Amino acid sequence: MTRKRILVTGGAGFLGSYLCEALLGQGHDVLCVDNFFTGSRDNVLHLLDDHRFELMRHDVTFPLYVEVDEIYNLACPASPIHYQFDPVQTVKTNVHGAINVLGLAKRTRARVFQASTSEVYGDPAVHPQPETYRGSVSPIGPRACYDEGKRCAETLFFDYHRQYGVDIRIARIFNTYGPRMNLNDGRVVSNFIVQALKGEPVTLYGDGSQTRSFCYVDDLIDGIVRLVQSPDVIGPINIGNPAEFTVRQLAEMVIEMTNSTSRIEYRPLPQDDPLQRQPDITRARMQLGWQPRVALRDGLARTIEHFEGKLNSASQRIYRPLIPQTSMPLPVANSLALQG
Ligand code: NAD
Ligand code: UDP
Ligand code: UDP
């Protein structure tokens, strides 16, 4: 394989850091660009000594002139609580960010990958969701900055492809979890594990009957690298684990696996929270020969182990999982790591 210069935007985030690792592992040079909104240097600390790895603080809403052969565009907060903290910035990150990486790809003739999302399907009326489903998204609700931002990014990718011949790839990523998620990420897997390990109430939004399908990070990275390295598959293509669980099942599984004394505490269901979500991965199976390998229980075991270590090393500090507070302003996103 030829050694490439690869740009990863959002490379210091949860998925981005694993992706940088995988690409370095294949012998490529990696330029990791991040504004550290939800990501951190800690996530890529172990890569900094590698001379093929470079870390740059930069916000993708501004132009970036670098010479690269391939681009993975992951920059964008993924947790609802973070992308709703500054919704205008979320739209800019998705739309201006996409225009800038596409402009860069057009000039350098680089292949460019977009980390799209199952959120383009909104609260889906079709189940499971195939790529042909056009979705049911509120353009004005609290999730719209993310959902519509990602939809517009897909539009831009296809228009740059048709109009300028830019070589694009799009994956629609379904809920992915694993070690290295931020303790205060606010998404369901990290919240439940941190709460259960601390013996605090596990916060279940709604009655817990809404479903999600959880993909382990290693499977996800394998899927998107296969897509980008395939000669002709453009996408959009669903990458996720079709095993579907209710959020209540997840809460019970986490409590059991951590031997926790935590009880479940019910909270209101956030507005526009999708009631069901499950990828149809026929395309990924047929076109990429890809399917997930790690079962939820196995992935959770690895993630719980990692969080136990993190909580122990942070024992002097009091971590609180991030959950929406109606009476309190949200904390400043850049200082999310510590509360209490
Ligand atoms: P994350 O929040 O851990 O990572 C996002 C990274 O982007 C962070 O490092 C953040 O600092 C950086 N970032 C945000 N705005 C930026 C900007 N304007 N300029 C530069 N960097 C910026 O989330 P993640 O789970 O690693 O998600 C990565 C990508 O995958 C996102 O685009 C997300 O929408 C997409 N995705 C993730 C999931 C999932 O379940 N993890 C599901 C669907 C889609
Ligand atoms: N751009 C960039 N890096 C590059 C080339 C372009 O950041 O190497 C940005 C540029 O600032 C522009 C955007 O990408 O705003 C879109 O580029 P395009 O060439 O499509 O548009 P134009 O420059 O013609 O407005
Ligand atoms: N959720 C929950 N408790 C939490 C965090 C999330 O019950 O502490 C629910 C949330 O309402 C949603 C599901 O878990 O139904 C997944 O939420 P997450 O924020 O992880 O991602 P989403 O798929 O909604 O973008």
Image: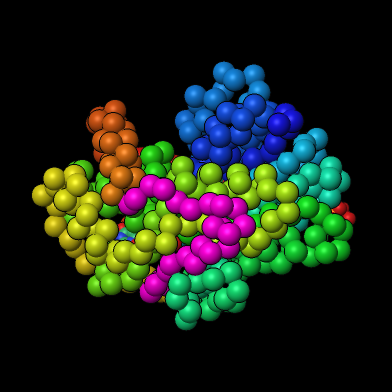
Taking 232 as reference, is 128 above or below it? below
The vertical placement of 337 against 118, above or below, is above
In the rendered structure, the answer to whether residue 272 lies left or right of residue 206 reads right
Position of residue 216 measured from the top left corner of the image (x, y, whole percent): 41, 48
Q: Residue at x 73, y 49 (%)?
A: 231
Nearest the camera: 318 or 263?
263
- Residue sitting at 71 percent across and 31 percent down? 1
Mark yes or no: residue 96 visible: no
> Which region is colored magenta?
273-296
* Residue 327 included in the magenta stretch of the image: no
Q: Nearer the viewer, residue 2 or 63?
A: 2
Q: Does 38 sit above or below residue 136?
A: above
Which residue is at 45% across, 72% downward? 128
Q: Quadrant of residue 28?
A: top right
Q: Measuring from the top left, give residue 243's x and y in whole percent.
A: 37, 61
Q: Quadrant of residue 312?
A: top left
- Left or right? Give the position of 108 relative to 54: right
- Name the magenta segment's main secondary structure: loop
Q: Position of residue 66 (x, y in %)?
A: 79, 36
Tell me, yes or no, whether the highlighted magenta stretch contains residue 278: yes
Give the camera-side residue of 86 and 13: 13
Question: What is the number of callouts on the image?
Answer: 0
Quick one: which residue is furthest to the bottom in this view?
125
The residue under the point 51% across, 62% down is 281
